[in-house]
Image (tube, rainbow, N blue to C red):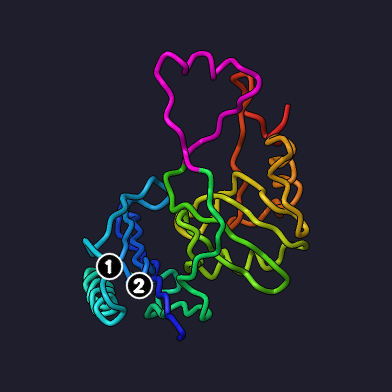
């Protein structure tokens, strides 16, 4: 059965106000959730869900359409000032890929100073976006959420990943229509998780085009210094 996953990115500019609002229908189990994110453009967005529990696709679509209409009535528009349209994905949307991302682990406060000076660890900025892995296999681009389910990808990011010269599995987070990449898990069809992180990060820096605002590698620090290239 075909499953349509819809996502809309809206923006509002007036005077000193420059805000963005994202709304999406995302699959979970046998149902769907309507999620949203909002805030000043370029800043950390506040996220939430309009559905306390999963609902049918028809119910989710009704909630989604109403929310988009309400925002556009308040002056929000898409980037090109046109009426937003759905992003429709293949029949595998919502399916479990079997891939799981590595999640953050908490540490005790008394460990922080040690970790900051231990050369076996590095530091990266957290953008507080939507966690997303992206796999490129030939011409097929697949978005994978933190639960391992196939999800929607903004078209600008999809097009940028499609231009990469090799097959990859990237891990990162989406803020607006920018994908901040912090790990390279597969390269040219090979799993490279066993390699050291700095080696994988160097692969990201070498792989991503330098002037594409849709794909950015996350700056990495070691020894209390922010490294422009990700390595000392």
The percent position of residue 61, horizontal first and vertical second, equals 29, 79
Q: In the image shown, does 160 or 141 lie closer to the viewer? A: 141
Examine the rendered structure and indicate whether residue 171 appears above or below residue 124. Answer: below
Mark 2 crowdedness (10 Å alpha carbons): few <14, some 14-19, many ≥20: few
The percent position of residue 16, horizontal first and vertical second, equals 31, 51
147 left or right, relative to 73: right
Examine the rendered structure and indicate whether residue 63 appears above or below residue 133. Answer: below
At mark 2, the secondary structure is loop
Task: Tell me, for residue 30, which label it has, or none.
Answer: 2
Are dots 1 and 2 in contact, CB under 8 Å? yes
- Image depth: mark 1 or mark 2 in front: 2
What quarter of the picture does the C terminus occupy? top right
* Residue occupying image coordinates x 62% and y 23%: 225
* Residue occupying image coordinates x 56% and y 29%: 123
Examine the rendered structure and indicate whether residue 127 appears above or below residue 27. Answer: above
Is 76 one of the magenta-colored residues? no
36 left or right, relative to 130: left
Examine the rendered structure and indicate whether residue 192 appears above or below residue 151. Answer: above
What quarter of the picture does the N terminus occupy? bottom left
Q: In the image shown, does 29 or 154 lie closer to the viewer? A: 29
Label 1: which residue? 54
* Residue occupying image coordinates x 46% and y 43%: 127
Q: CA distance from mark 1 to mark 2?
A: 8 Å
Is 122 one of the magenta-colored residues? yes
* Residue occupying image coordinates x 71% and y 40%: 194
Q: How many marks?
A: 2
The percent position of residue 205, horizontal first and vertical second, equals 71, 45
**Bounds of the magenta segment:** 103-126
At mark 1, the secondary structure is loop
Mark 1 crowdedness (10 Å alpha carbons): few <14, some 14-19, many ≥20: some
């Amino acid at each position: 059965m075909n499953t349509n996953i819809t996502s809309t990115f809206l923006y509002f500019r007036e005077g000193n106000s420059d805000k963005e609002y994202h709304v999406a229908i995302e699959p979970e189990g046998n149902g769907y959730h309507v999620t949203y994110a909002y805030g000043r453009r370029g800043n950390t967005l506040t996220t939430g869900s309009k559905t306390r529990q999963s609902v049918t696709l028809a119910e989710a679509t009704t909630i989604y359409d109403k929310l988009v209409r309400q925002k556009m009535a308040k002056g929000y528009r898409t980037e090109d000032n046109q009426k937003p349209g759905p992003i429709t994905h293949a029949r595998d949307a919502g399916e479990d890929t079997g891939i799981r991302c590595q999640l953050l682990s908490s540490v005790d406060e008394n460990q922080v100073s040690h970790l900051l000076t231990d050369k076996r660890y590095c530091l990266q900025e957290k953008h507080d976006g939507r966690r997303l892995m992206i796999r490129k296999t030939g011409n097929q681009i697949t978005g994978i959420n933190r639960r391992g389910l196939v999800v929607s990808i903004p078209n600008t990011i999809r097009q940028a990943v499609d231009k990469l010269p090799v097959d990859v599995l990237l891990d990162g987070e989406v803020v607006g229509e920018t994908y901040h990449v912090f790990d390279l898990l597969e390269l040219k069809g090979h799993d490279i998780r066993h390699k050291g992180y700095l080696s994988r990060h160097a692969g990201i820096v070498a792989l991503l085009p330098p002037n594409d605002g849709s794909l950015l590698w996350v700056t990495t620090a070691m020894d209390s210094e922010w490294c422009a290239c990700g390595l000392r």
